[in-house]
């Protein structure tokens, strides 16, 4: 049995793998996330497959949580559950539901709830020369402005394929993508010629809002609006003093923020790179 110990946002999560299939799945999902040799884990999962054609069984603390014959389904489920536990146990800084990328070493934070378009936007920006931190979970240690991303594969939900059709169809690494009925899991290096980076200083915050009307508009936000919108994306508030408000307010005072409404991706790369250069 092989054990992967993932470290993120001050949390250690262990995944024990029994069988060739489980080890391959975990390595595919989390090969870019820092590991630790420390034994104590906040949560322990065990993924088992008795033979190559057998059922996948996922246990949490020895209790069966999920079982399926589908490799894509168990990969998607594990992708979601690991995010939940890493955020749930973090107490040493702010954890945001957000994507994060880097442009020439400058950090771009894209916070937003599910369905706001942050993963779709992140995927497109990877084709425009941005580097990758995460599409889902960002940690900012207390009293810093340093972004740390959970560098998992991108989780492109059903419906986003229309916006990224040309990327997904023309991609030479399409065989590396895992597709189920509800999502496509895609390694960042398979989408664009990017580097995976683990930490960069925060320079800009953009709240993406996908609109079916086809609009493309970038509007600067006030510091008060920035703080209020960031609080709505903070997912470990209950673990922090004062619900994390003072730390969020500090970021909002020092970091320019915008709301981006878009219905297509044609002009987004130019708008955002211009914004990043102007700030820098």
Image: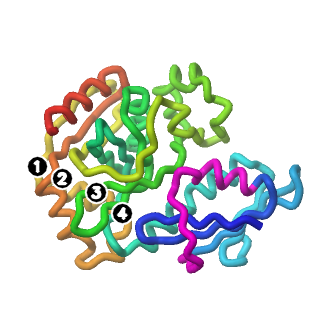
Query: Closer to us: mark 2 or mark 4?
Result: 4
**SS state under label 1:** loop
Please give the residue where the numbered disc 1 appears in the rendered image.
222
Q: Earlier in the sequence, mark 3 or mark 4?
A: 4
Query: Closer to us: mark 2 or mark 3?
Result: 3
- Residue at 38% from the left image edge and 47% from the top image edge: 99
- Residue at 58% from the left image edge and 51% from the top image edge: 31
Q: CA distance from mark 2 to mark 3?
A: 18 Å
Does 161 sit above or below residue 138?
above
Quadrant in the picture for the C terminus: top left
Query: Residues at badges 1 and 4 in contact (C-beta under 8 Å)?
Result: no
> Which dot marks residue 95?
4
- Residue 144 place in picture, x, y as percent: 23, 63
Quadrant in the picture for the N terminus: bottom right
Q: Nearer the viewer, residue 38 or 206?
A: 38
Query: Closer to us: mark 1 or mark 4?
Result: 4
- Residue at 52% from the left image edge and 50% from the top image edge: 152
Query: Closer to us: mark 3 or mark 1?
Result: 3
- Residue 166 place in picture, x, y as percent: 51, 20
For the residue carrying disc 2, how many other residues have a C-alpha within 10 Å: few (<14), some (14-19), or many (20+)?
Answer: many
Query: Residues at badges 2 and 1 in contact (C-beta under 8 Å)?
Result: yes
Query: Which span of residues is magenta-colored?
Result: 22-42
Please give the residue where the numbered disc 3 appears in the rendered image.
146
Q: Earlier in the sequence, mark 2 or mark 4?
A: 4
Please give the residue where the numbered disc 2 appears in the rendered image.
226
In reply to whether residue 24 is colored magenta, the answer given is yes
Q: Earlier in the sequence, mark 2 or mark 3?
A: 3
For the residue carrying disc 4, how many other residues have a C-alpha within 10 Å: few (<14), some (14-19), or many (20+)?
Answer: many
Q: Nearer the viewer, residue 5 or 240?
A: 5
């Amino acid at each position: 049995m092989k054990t992967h110990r993932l470290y993120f946002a001050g949390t250690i999560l262990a995944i024990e793998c029994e069988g060739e299939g489980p080890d391959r799945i975990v390595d595919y999902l989390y090969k870019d996330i820092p590991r630790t040799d420390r034994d104590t884990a906040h949560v322990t999962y065990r993924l088992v497959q008795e033979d190559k054609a057998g059922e996948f069984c996922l246990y949490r603390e020895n209790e069966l949580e999920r079982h399926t014959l589908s490799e894509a389904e168990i990969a998607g489920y594990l992708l979601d559950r690991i995010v939940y536990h890493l955020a749930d146990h973090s107490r040493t800084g702010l954890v945001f539901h957000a994507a994060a990328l880097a442009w020439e070493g400058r950090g771009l934070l894209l916070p937003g709830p599910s369905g706001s378009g942050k993963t779709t936007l992140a995927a497109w920006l990877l084709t425009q020369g941005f580097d990758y931190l995460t599409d889902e979970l960002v940690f900012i240690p207390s009293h810093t402005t340093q972004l740390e991303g959970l560098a998992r594969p991108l989780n492109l939900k059903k419906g986003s394929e229309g916006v990224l059709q040309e990327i997904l169809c023309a991609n030479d690494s399409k065989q590396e993508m895992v597709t189920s009925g509800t999502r496509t899991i895609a390694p960042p290096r398979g989408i664009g010629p990017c580097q995976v980076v683990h930490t960069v200083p925060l320079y800009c915050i953009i709240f993406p809002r996908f609109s079916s009307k086809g609009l493309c508009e970038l509007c600067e936000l006030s510091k008060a609006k920035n703080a209020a919108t960031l609080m709505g994306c903070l997912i470990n508030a209950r673990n922090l003093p004062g619900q994390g408000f003072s730390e969020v307010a500090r970021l909002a005072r020092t970091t320019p923020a915008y709301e981006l409404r878009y219905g297509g991706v044609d002009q987004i790369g130019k708008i955002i790179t211009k914004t990043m250069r102007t700030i820098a």
